[in-house]
Amino acid sequence: MRIMGLDWGEKRVGIALSDPLGWTAQGLAVIDNKGSAKALLNTIKEYAQKYDVELVVVGFPRNMNGSPGPQAEKIKAFAGRLSGAIGLPIELWDERLTTSAAEKLLIEADLSRARRRQVVDKMAAVLILQGYLDFLNRKKDLRDE
């Protein structure tokens, strides 16, 4: 089962995709989120269909104490519209510190500031999706014991 991960932002949306076995997440694309919401949803739907995605994981902003962050209502609204547009189940997944972790990884990889700006959202989507995949795999391992 392929799973798609999204890091939604008001300017850009990062997209990641799992391998068919659900072990690893790879960065797929960054979409500008400056046009119409319908165009964004259609683009995500096209990626989901192209890669036979069965589930979409959307990063959900939480504060450090676990309470929903300031963008939480916007993410919930986006996830609801997305579910209706693509007809797939949507999971909200804690995205605390993913963008800063992605930025740190890209700095360590010695990417220029301009290049980091181009890929940080994709890398954040990878971290969101990989966290979800790791959770699923740990859960599966516990059931198999």
Image (cartoon, rainbow, N blue to C red):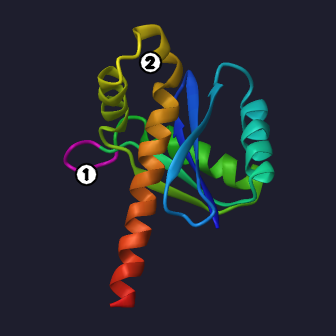
Q: Would you identify the image quadrant in which residue 52 lies?
A: bottom right
Magenta part, dominant SS: loop
Q: Which residues are magenta?
A: 63-68
Under circle 2, the secondary element is helix
Which residue is denoted by mark 2 in the rendering?
116
Q: Is 145 positioned to the left or the right of 82 in the image? A: left
**Vertically, is 69 above or below 121?**
below
Q: Residue at x 35, y 24 (%)?
A: 109
Q: Residue at x 72, y 41 (%)?
A: 44
Check if mark 1's residue and mark 2's residue have beta carbons within 8 Å: no
Amino acid of disc 2: Arg
**Vertically, is 17 above or below 41?**
below
* The C terminus, quarter of image: bottom left
- Which numbered disc flags the more N-terminal residue, 1 or 2? 1
Q: Residue at x 38, y 87 (%)?
A: 143
Q: Would you identify the image quadrant in which residue 72 lies?
A: top left
Under circle 1, the secondary element is loop
Q: Is 68 positioned to the left or the right of 33 in the image? A: left
Q: Outermost residue, left direction?
A: 65
Which is in the foreground here, disc 1 or disc 2? 2
Viewer-closest of 17 and 12: 17
Q: Residue at x 51, y 24 (%)?
A: 119
Viewer-closest of 80 and 120: 120
Amino acid of disc 1: Gly
Binning the other alpha carbons within 10 Å of mark 2 as few (below 14), some (14 to 19) or many (20 upward) gives some
Is residue 66 on the magenta stretch? yes
Is residue 7 on the magenta stretch? no
Which residue is denoted by mark 1 in the rendering?
66
> Measured from the top left, where is residue 43 in percent x and y?
76, 36
